[in-house]
Image: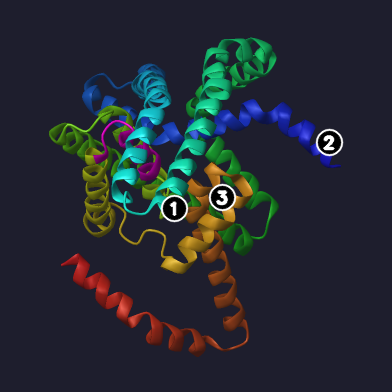
Amino acid sequence: MRKAIGSLMNILMPFVYGVVIAYLLRPTCNFFEKNLRILSRKLWKKERRGLCVGLSIALSFILFFLIVYLLLAMMIPQLLRSIRVISVRIPLFLEVVQEWIERLFSDNQVISSYLGDSVEDIETTLREWIQGSLLPSLNNVMDNFTNGVMGAFNLLYNLFVGVVAAVYILVSRKRFAAQSKLILYGSLKTHVADWIYQEVCYADRMFSGFLAGKILDSTIIGVICFIACSILKIPNTMLVSVIVGVTNIIPFFGPYIGGVPSALIILMESPVKCVWFIILIVILQQIDGNILGPRILGNSTGLSGFWVLFSIILFSGLFGFVGMIIGVPLFAIIYDIVRRCVCYGLEQRGKEELMEQYKDRFHREERRQRREEGK
């Protein structure tokens, strides 16, 4: 059974890519289509509708591929350069550390000798790893790619078919939505169909609002990081800014996931600049957590800090990196479904006053804080 499901998922993987790409590009496509309609209102006729829809989809894909290309063009060259610089400077850095330890513990020969031997062992291990594993791996990237050409071909094939499927989905998205609604209400009882329709609409608002807000928030953080790093003359400005901006999409753990490797990259070139960068990251995260995040996202998920942490840990364990991104809105949907089921159960048993007591007890302070934030 599991093997059959796995085979079916492999067959349908291009369409999964297509659905994801179409969902991500749908807001952009709607934006272009709306503005094209406004610009061509005098020429808006039935026969021109297809042209405007096609043009909006084309512009959305052009923007999407342009962003992906720019990110890869900025990251890959600097990342390879940073790896090579780090591989060269690690031995020099360890020599400086060893000299500093020798000067610091010059009066205690036992500690000085022990620490010196430890640093030499670390240096030898790192040098062997760099020369024996890291650099050959970098030099054999193309060889490994050639050996795995079938896997790369399958990935490219899935992405290509996914892009084609995304085009068809975007063209027919309104028709698909109407057909799904007809199937829903035609096959289920009205109250059940209403409940499912409301949850689907809520899930759509939750995912689209959360992802759009986090992308905007992370873009602003990345731009601010780039400007600040440029002013402070921090090495690898473009690379660390892109890393900080991209990883900031991940709630809670994002700043640490992006800040730690970026700080290590800078440390190999300038320890002083690394300290400045750490201070900058702390300031940026305070700005993001207290100013940008609440203004852009607000309390869009309705989850407390505990459930945010729980959802990230749970879904990152189930789906990896993707789970860290979608975990919060996905758990917010599950939380809302459970809340609705509890409310329905209390209503059926004539215990609605319990929910009112709960709201009065625990939500009064939250409402007051929201009113203050609104002012």
Q: Amino acid at mark 3?
A: Ser
Distance CA(mark 3)–CA(mark 1) = 46 Å
Q: Give the tally of numbered discs.
A: 3
Q: Position of residue 360 (x, y in %)?
A: 38, 86
Residue 316's disc is 3
Name the foreground residue: 47 vs 181.
181
Q: Is residue 109 above or below residue 139?
A: below
Name the foreground residue: 226 vs 25.
226
Residue 343 visible somewhere in the drawing: yes
**Label 3 crowding class (10 Å Cα cut-off): few <14, some 14-19, many 20+?**
some
Find numbered disc 2 in the image and state the secondary structure of the residue it sits on: helix
Does label 3 or label 1 sit earlier along the sequence?
1
Q: Which residue is mark 1?
A: 110
Residue 198 visible somewhere in the drawing: no
Distance CA(mark 2)–CA(mark 1) = 64 Å
Residue displayed at 32% across by 29% down: 239
Q: Amino acid at mark 1?
A: Val
**Left or right: 138 as drawn, with respect to 375:** right
Q: Quadrant of residue 125?
A: top right
Q: Amino acid at mark 2?
A: Ala
Tag in front: 3 or 1? 1
Name the foreground residue: 102 vs 270.
102
Find numbered disc 1 in the image and state the secondary structure of the residue it sits on: helix
Q: Which residues are magenta?
A: 258-271
